[in-house]
Amino acid sequence: MLEQLRFWPFSWAQKQETHPAFALNHGWFKDIDQNQPLEHYNFVVFDTELTGLSRKDEIVSIGAVHVRDLRIVAGETFHSFVRPHKITKATESTFLHRITPEQLALAPSLKEILPKFLEFCGPSLLVGHYVSLDVGFINQAAKKIFGSTISNPCLDTMRMAQIYTETCWEKHLEQFNLQISFNLADLSTDYGLPAFSQHDALQDSLQTAYLFIYLAKKLKDHGLITLKDLFDAGRSWKRVF
């Protein structure tokens, strides 16, 4: 499910063209200059809420926010609950993301939401925390519903945090912490970023957006300036702790 996204923090999804929304999506990313600084690109930072983590589980919420010039664009957000094929009674996952079966029963289907999400994203690159999970579920559903997958290049803030941590260690800019957590909330606390409610797709998107902007600026200070710099760093990164 996630093989097409194995290289992080930057990667490409598979390309097929069957639905107009997906055809337009694929057209945006046929030729991208990776040698521009990150400020040059538009990003959509997004998150999904799921019924679980198995292949049989489904998306129940999508949230997203635009980032331009490494700034969150106020008012340009996307959020929707998503009606899964099977609506069950409250489960452990339901309690986690606080979405009730009644809310899901009234929500639009993913067949309705995905084209709208692609329209919201436009030619933007995608950003997420452990983004392969979210894109993997989106592509699994999109291929089943539309016979296609999304093509947006992706950046992973978890991988960016790992690169930043290793860079600091190599330059002895901070004391080694062998218990470091790359959980979104923990990283945000460690870096002194604003705190948002957890396990809510839009709130997690805003949390990730702040983390992305913070890390992008910190990595720029360490010489990782262009999209290609991050791509190369993501491919060569090796976990040493």
Image (cartoon, grey):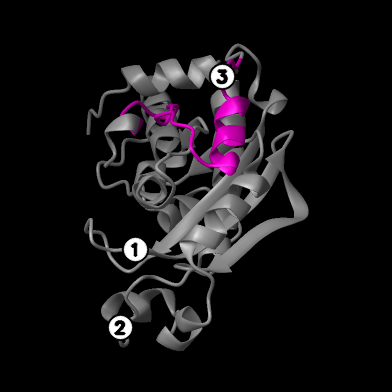
Residue labelled with disc 1: 58
Number of numbered discs:
3
Residue labelled with disc 3: 30
- Vertical side of 126 occupied by 219: above or below: above
Mark pair 3, 1: CA separation: 29 Å
Question: Can residue 84 be seen by looking at this rendering?
Answer: yes
Nearer to me, 210 or 35: 35
- Mark 1 nearby-residue class (10 Å; few <14, some 14–19, many ≥20): many
Q: Is residue 36 magenta?
A: no
Q: Amino acid at mark 1?
A: Glu
Residue at position x 68%, y 42% from top?
67
SS category of the residue bearing label 3: loop
- Residue 215 as seen in the image, left or right of residue 76: left
Q: Main secondary structure of the magenta part?
A: loop
Q: Amino acid at mark 3?
A: Lys
Q: Position of residue 95 (x, y in %)?
A: 36, 81
Mark 3 and mark 1 lie on one chain; the one further toward the N terminus is: 3
Q: Is residue 14 magenta?
A: yes
Mark 2 and mark 3 lie on one chain; the one further toward the N terminus is: 3
- Magenta part of the chain: 5-32
